[in-house]
Amino acid sequence: MLCFGAFFRTSGRKRAVFFPAGAVCYNECWFLQIERREKPAMSAMDKMWASLYAIGLMLIASALITFARTKTTGILRFFLSLIAFLLLIPIVILMIVSIF
């Protein structure tokens, strides 16, 4: 079936869209609705994995800080605390990604 025009809704009103002659339309121009939808940046499963990675990194950072403050002194304590602090950067990024 040739599709010379189709109707779809934009914010409550119908709008006609016309195609050049010879455009093939299957199933009453169903591809119009698919092309107009915005694809999500990440799927729900991707967001779940990002949040799980963030939780894992938070556990590692928490364990590093706890170990550094209870068992070490001097320069080693500083470096372990610095590593734990630097782990907060990807944690915040992953948290923002999983929210939006």
Image (spheres, rainbow, N blue to C red):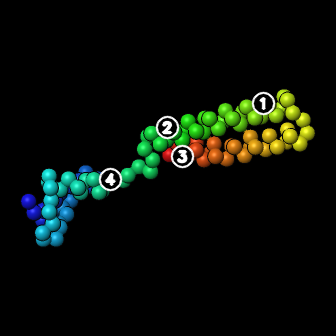
Give the residue type that dot 2 points to. Answer: Met
Q: What element carries label 3?
A: helix
| Residue 48 image label | 2
Q: What element carries label 1?
A: helix
- The residue labelled by disc 3 is 97
Q: In which quarter of the image is residue 29?
A: bottom left
Give the residue type that dot 1 points to. Answer: Thr
Give the residue type that dot 3 points to. Answer: Val
Of the pair 30 and 9, the residue shown nearer to us: 30
Tell me: 74 left or right of 42. Answer: right
Is disc 4 surrounded by few (<14), some (14 to 19) or many (20+) residues within 10 Å? Answer: few
- The residue labelled by disc 1 is 66
Q: Quadrant of residue 4?
A: bottom left
State which tag comes first along the sequence, 1 or 2: 2
The alpha-carbon separation of the residues under discs 3 and 4 comes to: 21 Å
Would you say the residues marked 1 and 2 are in contact, meaning their CB atoms lie under 8 Å apart?
no
State which tag comes first along the sequence, 1 or 4: 4
State which tag comes first along the sequence, 4 or 2: 4
Would you say the residues marked 3 and 2 are in contact, meaning their CB atoms lie under 8 Å apart?
no
Q: Is mark 4 on a helix, strand or loop?
A: loop
Give the residue type that dot 4 points to. Answer: Arg
State which tag comes first along the sequence, 3 or 4: 4
The alpha-carbon separation of the residues under discs 4 and 2 comes to: 23 Å
Of the pair 25 and 10, the residue shown nearer to us: 25
The alpha-carbon separation of the residues under discs 3 and 2 comes to: 10 Å
Residue 78, given in percent of the width and then of the height, sits at 85, 42
Residue 33, given in percent of the width and then of the height, sits at 25, 53
- The residue labelled by disc 4 is 37
- Residue beneath the point at 60% across and 39% down: 54
The alpha-carbon separation of the residues under discs 1 and 4 comes to: 48 Å
Q: What element carries label 2?
A: helix
